[in-house]
Amino acid sequence: MEHLIKVTDLCKVYNPGENEVRALDHINLKIDRGEFVAIIGQSGSGKSTFMNMLGCLDTPTSGTYFLNGTDVSTMTDNELSAVRNREIGFIFQGFNLIANLTAEENVELPLIYRGIDKKTRRQLAREALEMVGLSHRMNHKPSEMSGGQQQRVAIARAIAAKPPVILADEPTGNLDSASSKEILSILKDLHKGGRTVILITHDDGIAARAKRVVRIMDGKIESDVINPAFDSMEEEHEKGSIEK
C-alpha cells in the first residue's frame, strides 16, 4: 500500500557554503493513512522547517517528498498552492480567522477557492461545525467566541473539504488547559474517524496524546516510536465520551 507521506533524504540548507545552516539534515519519514503522529522538537530543532515542508509551504534543498503519490519537492509556488488547497487542512496556533466573517463563512472560505458551489460548501461547512460542536455558533463572529471556540472553527475550516492530511501546528499554544484538552479530544476523534493527523509541538505532554511520536533534534530525526500509553488513553477517552 502506498504511503500517504514519504520523505526521503530531505535536506534544507540556508546560507550554503562556509556559514551554512542545515535546518534539515537527511530526514527520512513515512506516514500512512489514518495515523496520528506528533512531531516534537524544541526551538531551533528543525521542527518548524519540517512542518513547512510537510505543509507544502516551502521546498527542500535536496531530497524528495511524495504526498498522496505525487512528488511535491520540486513544484513551483503556484503548484504548491494548489496542492495545499487540495491535500492539506491546516490548524494554526493563531486561529487565522477573518474577523468580519461568521464561523460558517470562515469555514466556507477555502471551499470557495476550490470552486465548490454555494449549496455544497454551505452543507460541508455546517457538517464540519457540527462535528466540532459548534452548530449553535455558526452565525457568530470570532470576537463573539472564546479562544477554544475560535480554534474549533479553525478545525472545522481545516476538515470541511475532507483533505487527506490534517496538519496542526501548535494548535493549543494560545489556549488554557481546559480548551487545550477539548481541542486534543477533537483531534483524537478525527483520527478515530479515519483522518490522518500530524501534530507539531514542542510540548512532551501534548505529543503524548498522539499514537506515534517523532522527535527532531539538530535537523535530524532522533527517535520515532509508538506511544505505548495511547491505547489506554483511547479507552479512557471513550469512557469519558460515554459518560457525557
Image (cartoon, rainbow, N blue to C red):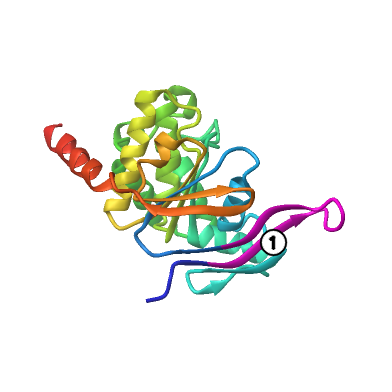
Vertical side of 81 occupied by 227: above or below? above
Q: Report the magenta residues as a range.
A: 7-27
Amino acid type, residue under disc 1 in the picture: Asp
Task: Give the main secondary structure of the magenta stretch.
Answer: strand
Instruction: Please state which of residues 172 and 11 is positioned toward the viewer in this rendering.
Output: 11
Q: Is residue 27 left or right of residue 11?
A: left
Q: Is residue 19 magenta?
A: yes
Q: Is residue 83 left or right of residue 181?
A: right
Q: Position of residue 36 (x, y in %)?
A: 37, 52
Q: Residue at x 54, y 31 (%)?
A: 100
Q: Position of residue 98 (x, y in %)?
A: 55, 35
Count of number-bearing discs: 1
Q: Residue at x 65, y 41 (%)?
A: 44
Q: Residue at x 49, y 24 (%)?
A: 143
Question: Circle 1 sits in a helix, a strand or a loop, which is it?
Answer: helix
Screen quadrant of the N terminus: bottom left
Quadrant of the image occupied by residue 144: top left
Pointer 1 local density, CA inside 10 Å: few below 14, some 14–19, many at least 20: few
Residue placed under numbered mark 1 in the picture: 77
Tell which residue pokes out farthest to the right in this image: 18
- Can residue 104 be seen here? The reply is no
Q: Residue at x 31, y 38 (%)?
A: 185
Screen quadrant of the C terminus: top left
Vertical side of 141 occupied by 22: above or below? below
- Can residue 218 be seen here? The reply is yes
Quadrant of the image occupied by residue 41: top right
